[in-house]
Amino acid sequence: MGNKSSGVTVSLAVHCHVSWTQIVCPRAMASEASVRAALASALAGADEAVAEYAVSVAQGVLDDAGGDTSSLAAELEDALAPLLADAGISDADVTALCLSLTRLCSNDTNGGGQHMATAGPVGDEGDTAPALLDLRGIILAYGGRVLLRPTSFTLTTGGRYGLVGANGVGKTTLLTRLAAGDILGFPAHVTTALVQHEAVGSGGSAVQFLQQAVPSASRTDIDAALSVVGFTPTMAAASVSALSGGWRMRLALARSTLLQVDLLLLDEPTNHLDVTATAWLQNYVCTQLPGVTVVCVSHDASFLEAICTHIIYFTDLSLQFFPGGMAAFRAAMPHVVLPSRTLSSAARMATDGSGNAEQQPVGVGIGGESAVAEGMSDEAVLAAELAAASAAVAAGKIQPFVFPDPGPLDGIKSRNKVVLRATGLTFTHPGAAHATLKHVDARLCLASRVAVTGANGAGKTTLMKLLVGDIALPPRDCGEVWRHHSLRVAYVAQHALHHLEEAQRMTPVEYIQTRFAAGRDAEDRHKSTIALTAEEQALSAARGGVEAICGRRLQGGTLMYEVKKQGRPAKDNSWEPLSFLQAMPPYVMKLVRDYDERLKAMQGGMEVRPLTSTEVKAHLLAFGIGEELALSKIKGFSGGQKSRLVIAAAMWNRPHLLCLDEPTNYLDRESVACLAAGLKSFVGAVLAVSHSPAFVQALCTEEWHIEQGALSVVKERRTIED
């Protein structure tokens, strides 16, 4: 539990699985008393804490069903079987019990989710401010797993709390339960807002987003809220889809301002921010939110040090409070921040075997000070941690990310041979007055390790999407992107939900099996450069239109494609050069790209790679997702676990080029170090957008900096052969 003389140890417990629908429109599916009675005989000999947890899990699954009992018995069995098996209950009895609970859900009219009364207030030692929240005797559990044991929790009015801990302990789950107000004894009068920039939709303008999110707000209030967070009138009228992650975060903050909340919950708010934007957010939190209580999840220790009055350390199924912020936390828990010995000796131990490295971890997710790190900047500490962890990976002390070998490319005999090129690239977002990118030239080879840097909104993500073919150049823009015809490319967006939004109720195994079930990546079908519009489908279906691309071959150095036209037999198919097809209506090149992607999938072995659970679990393990997580629902994952999953999924097709947009977001520092080490040994090329100088320094041999639409190379590049 840590040093109790230095910080107040506080417990907390939250009911899990309750949906937002239930909170807004309370309609419990079964009363807690009914669930407890149904489980009483089965758990008669079980430990009291286990019995209480089983009741909480069962109640959560029942509530989460939302009235749909079609698969409820199976979901109950998935959640309860491990607990009941440990209590000595047979599989048959577990099945019978879950069927009984399902019937209970259908028949119980007593109401449920009744909260037990809590005891009197408990405050942090030394705090004199009034308590905003005073919660007791509650449990946090999710997906059949205990995250917090029964304990109590107090937040003072106007306090700013940093919530820290390793990936996967339950920080985001705690924030979502606080945001929903679904906590034992949570006061009805306390209003909350959870700021997660990836949850901001991409349709309409910023003004329209706020009008939909806060219907009661006037246009004057909306304009004022947007102005406070830095939006100009032009930006406010532009499409949300054109906003960078940093500006989406500001938009989410504007929403919380309009709601006039008592409790503001920030989930990794600095993830997509450059240095200037981070400084702005620091000032905003400290000066623009009088009387608002803030809880912030972050791996950015310097940011937490600047804003926090308290630190909450989430570890070992408990919470420990440290009034005084990062200084008090570091003083009380120096072993959590960094190992007690110097970083250089830690790295030396990892490589030469001296000392006992396994008892002196490199770091567990929070940056700070050590014997040599006193006074170092957070980025300098992270750089040192990366170096030490990379050495530990090399020595086998830490499991790295293991990236598969993509295999050779046709005609590419050297890793320095160019495989992707952008020439004169100019791009303007729909509705924007000015171009985001202007006459950009860039080249990549298989040996490339490139970081794309620049301020928020500079166009980093736009450039990456153009290079990977996720978006197409509008007709009014110019330039060209050439990719080797067999180059397999994987793209991991900066928002994990971009990939996982329709897979929340799947497990990682099911997600990969579903995404690649057709022998290729299903996400290819959604790219604007491949998907046909209704008008284009009509052109393709018209007599004489190009129905499909059926083959590809290299003839005399020219790439030729077999073209099938509507209304003509296959024997009349013609072979046409790529240049001829490029001059046809744009939908024809979409068919060409679709065929290319199918062929690349075949070349990568995806059609013959088995999608068995065993094969998928082995693949996930290479990216730090063990069997327990591989079989858990994705909706319960932390941000860091989702990041690992989308990277693992992107590597299923063994790409030659991996494009990562803000890959260090949500990852704790050990995971960042493992990612950097894995990417350094990856045989293919890496293109990464990042605001982390330490990550860039650890991995990249070349840096592309974007400013005012122009790209410049600010770090020495290796020789690339045309």
Image (cartoon, helix red, strand yellow):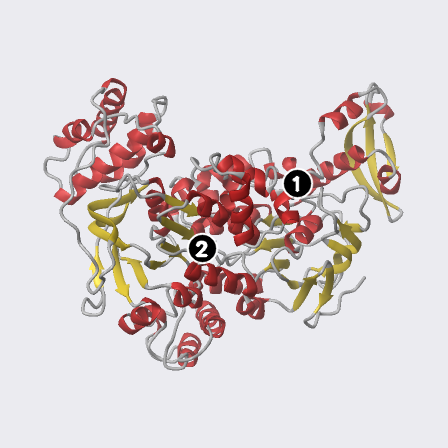
- From the image, which quarter does the N terminus lie in? bottom left
**Residue 390's spot in the image, x, y percent?**
48, 69
- Marking on residue 268: 2
Quickly name the residue at label 1: 602
Q: Residue 633's image quarter?
A: top left
Q: Is residue 575 left or right of residue 407?
A: right
Q: How crowded is the residue under tag 1: few (<14 C-alpha within 10 Å), some, or many (20+)?
A: some
Type of amino acid at the residue the image marks with label 2: Glu
Q: Nearer the viewer, residue 230 or 387?
A: 230
Q: Is residue 524 left or right of residue 541?
A: left
Identity of the residue drawn at 43% across and 61% down? 287
Q: Is residue 671 left or right of residue 596?
A: left
- Marking on residue 457: none
Q: Is mark 1 on a helix, strand or loop?
A: helix
Q: Which of 648 and 408 is in front in this view?
A: 648
**Residue 467's spot in the image, x, y percent?**
70, 51
Q: Which of marks 2 and 1 is nearer the N terminus?
A: 2
Report if residue 536 is visible in the image. yes
**Residue 595's spot in the image, x, y percent?**
73, 36
Q: How crowded is the residue under tag 2: few (<14 C-alpha within 10 Å), some, or many (20+)?
A: many
Furthest toward the front, the residue is: 220
Identity of the residue drawn at 44% across and 37% down? 504
Report if residue 359 is visible in the image. no
Above or below for 706 versus 35 = below
Type of amino acid at the residue the image marks with label 1: Met
Q: What element carries label 2?
A: loop
